[in-house]
Image: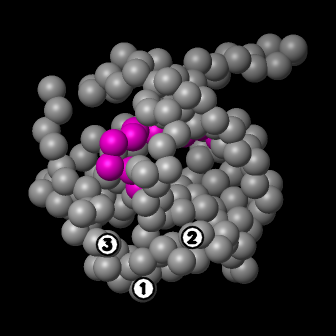
Amino acid sequence: MASIDGVVVTHPQFHGDDRGRFAETYRRSWFPIGREMVQANVSEKEAGAVVGIHFHLHQADYWFVPRGRARVVLVDLRTGSPTEGAIDTFDMGDAAEVGAFIPPGVGHGFAALTDLTITYLVDQYYNPADENGVAWDDPDLGIDWGVADAVVSPRDQANPRVRDIPPDRRPIFALRT
């Protein structure tokens, strides 16, 4: 499913009985670069909300949607990446129970196709200096978010187009071993 270098999509196995269901949704060994996640976050959004496109120069994320359905958009913004400029769009959540590891420099956003809860693990503590973004509606990207009337934060409405990312904020692809 993922065509962007370094992005890993997981397929957790759910086990259930008449009491409910259980799944292991994250395991560090699933990811080749093996970054240690140090902070867990949860976000609840109403249907129609669009978040992003955000990116970090140093932070990796791991997303999972335990309730509802999200349209996920990933954009490889890393200069020198073998998949530079690639865009992945896929759904997560109800009937699409996958997780997504997003390396630093890959732009990420989601649209709430239904009311939803998204959980995400990060490998850096919150650092406002590492918060970056590009326009969710950048015409050069041509993204179909799957919502008719997007509700977007003022911050995300103010993000620049990809071609206008300042050079000192442009992610650089780095090989990891």
Q: Nearer the viewer, mark 2 or mark 1?
A: 2
Task: Please state if 68 lies on the left or on the right of 64 as rendered.
Answer: right
- Mark 3 sits on what residue? 165
**Based on the displayed image, in which of its 4 quarters is residue 101 positioned?**
top left
Q: Does residue 63 show up magenta in the picture?
A: yes
Earlier in the chain: of badge 2 and badge 1, it is 1
- Mark 1 sits on what residue? 139
**In 3D space, how far apart are the residues under numbered discs 2 and 1 (Cα atoms)?**
15 Å
**In 3D space, how far apart are the residues under numbered discs 3 and 2 (Cα atoms)?**
14 Å
Q: Position of residue 89 (x, y in %)?
A: 46, 60
Q: Position of residue 93 (x, y in %)?
A: 65, 44
**Based on the displayed image, in which of its 4 quarters is residue 171 positioned?**
bottom left
The amino acid marked with disc number 2 is Asp
Q: Position of residue 62 (x, y in %)?
A: 49, 36
Q: What element does badge 2 sit on?
A: helix
Task: Please state if 69 lies on the left or on the right of 137 as rendered.
Answer: right
Q: Nearer the viewer, mark 1 or mark 3?
A: 3
Q: Is residue 27 above or below residue 3?
A: above
User: Toward the viewer: 5 or 18?
Assistant: 5
Q: Is residue 43 above or below residue 91?
A: above
**Based on the displayed image, in which of its 4 quarters is residue 14 positioned?**
top right
Image disc number at residue 76: none
The amino acid marked with disc number 3 is Ile
- Mark 2 sits on what residue? 156
